[in-house]
Amino acid sequence: MSPYLSVVIPIFNEEANITTLWKRVSTVLREHFSEPGRDWEVIFTDDGSRDRSLEMLTEIAETEPRVSVVEFNRNYGQHSAIFGAFALVSGQVIVTMDADLQNPPEEIPKLVAKIDEGFDVVGGWRQGRNQNDSLFRTLPSKIVNAVTRKTTGVKLHDYGCMLRAYRREIVEAMLLCKERSSFIPALANSFAKRITEVPVGHAERAAGTSKYGLWKLINLQFDLLTSFSLLPLQMLSVLGVVVSFLGIGFGIYLMIYRILHPEGTVQGVFTLFAILFIFVGAQFLAFGLLGEYIGRIYQEVRDRPRYVVKKIHKVL
Ligand code: UDP
Ligand code: MG
């Protein structure tokens, strides 16, 4: 019989967390989802870990038939890893969470209860984000949240929290999306009718270090900006108009100045330089943004698989 709840956990070099993670997750699931018809499964994706993570996961899968492990042949990133597990889920409700125990597994029943109430997507909203998360990590997240709210039009407090629950149909719709640069919380919301958030706890990373550096975050932001809106392209036209008007204004100023001070030619040259720099700057910005879109079109057109599964570990 297929389970009611599928829990999806991406793993990238998390050997120090897996034992505790499994202990806590399995305790919660056994406690809350043991009645008939409300069974559970856990699907781990090993996203090309270079430590003992895969070994530890397969050991779990050997003793617990409700656990599967998807092994990627290399590292494809958190969101691809989640997709890799989505392809296998058989539950009616799907919960995603991080492996580093920043998302307490004890909150899972709370999220599932909201789905039972009739919501399609339930997001975790991290209350009192951990003080130890450095400014380097929280400030970019704040910007990501603000821009995402603007571009997707769905007003959630916390897009970054991966402790989330989805109804099965939403996951199936996401699986139909062929694009590679997708940000799961935003993508899910574009298919959902009833979305809600529940406050969840937020702990320090139990062990290991964050797999997200500044560069990965900037990339994620570009993903969001270009996959869910045409805002940058529209801003480009606005910027173009503004710069042109500035140029015209400068031209008029220059003409009047020349008429009033016929001998002041040297200053005129400097003004021209100023105008030139404004234009050059604007052009570079424009090229950069156009390039971003074209680069993405190129990526999508190639239609490469999002990931390659090497093996699925599961005892039958
Ligand atoms: N992760 C992954 N592939 C990656 C990076 C991260 O599967 O390339 C997993 C990681 O193992 C963890 C989750 O994604 O379970 C979130 O990663 P992390 O805690 O490093 O992100 P942060 O909490 O700093 O946003
Ligand atoms: Mg984390």
Image (cartoon, grey):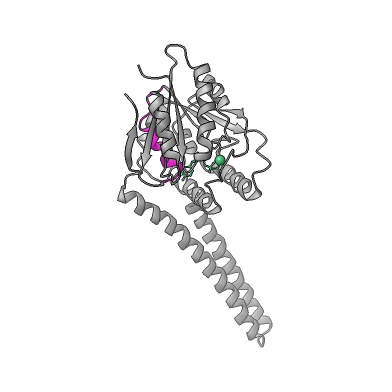
Q: Is residue 128 left or right of residue 207?
A: right
Locate the C terminus and report the quarter of the image it occupies.
Answer: top left
Please tell me whether residue 283 is drawn above or below residue 146 in the rendered image: below
Q: Is residue 65 left or right of residue 279?
A: left
Q: Residue furthest top?
A: 36
Residue at x 50% of width, y 29% of height = 22
**Rendered location of residue 178, percent (x, y):** 35, 41
- Residue 252: tell me if it is visible: yes
- Residue 118: tell me if it is visible: no
| Camera-side residue of 68 and 51 | 51
Which region shows up in magenta?
Answer: 76-91
Residue at x 36% of width, y 52% of height = 299
| Camera-side residue of 73 and 263 | 73
Residue at x 60% of width, y 36% of height = 157
Please tell me whether residue 97 is drawn above or below residue 2 in the rendered image: below
Please tell me whether residue 5 is drawn above or below residue 123 in the rendered image: above
Locate the N terminus and report the quarter of the image it occupies.
Answer: top left
Q: Is residue 305 left or right of residue 75?
A: left
| Camera-side residue of 308 and 28 | 28
Q: Quadrant of residue 132?
A: top right
| Camera-side residue of 69 and 157 | 69
**Rendered location of residue 269, percent (x, y):** 60, 82
Q: Is residue 79 magenta?
A: yes
Q: Please give the count of numbered marks on the rendered protein.
A: 0
Q: Residue furthest bottom?
A: 263
**Rendered location of residue 192, percent (x, y):** 46, 29
**Rendered location of residue 196, percent (x, y):** 55, 27
Q: Is residue 29 left or right of residue 168?
A: right
Q: Is residue 97 magenta?
A: no
Residue at x 65% of width, y 38% of height = 129
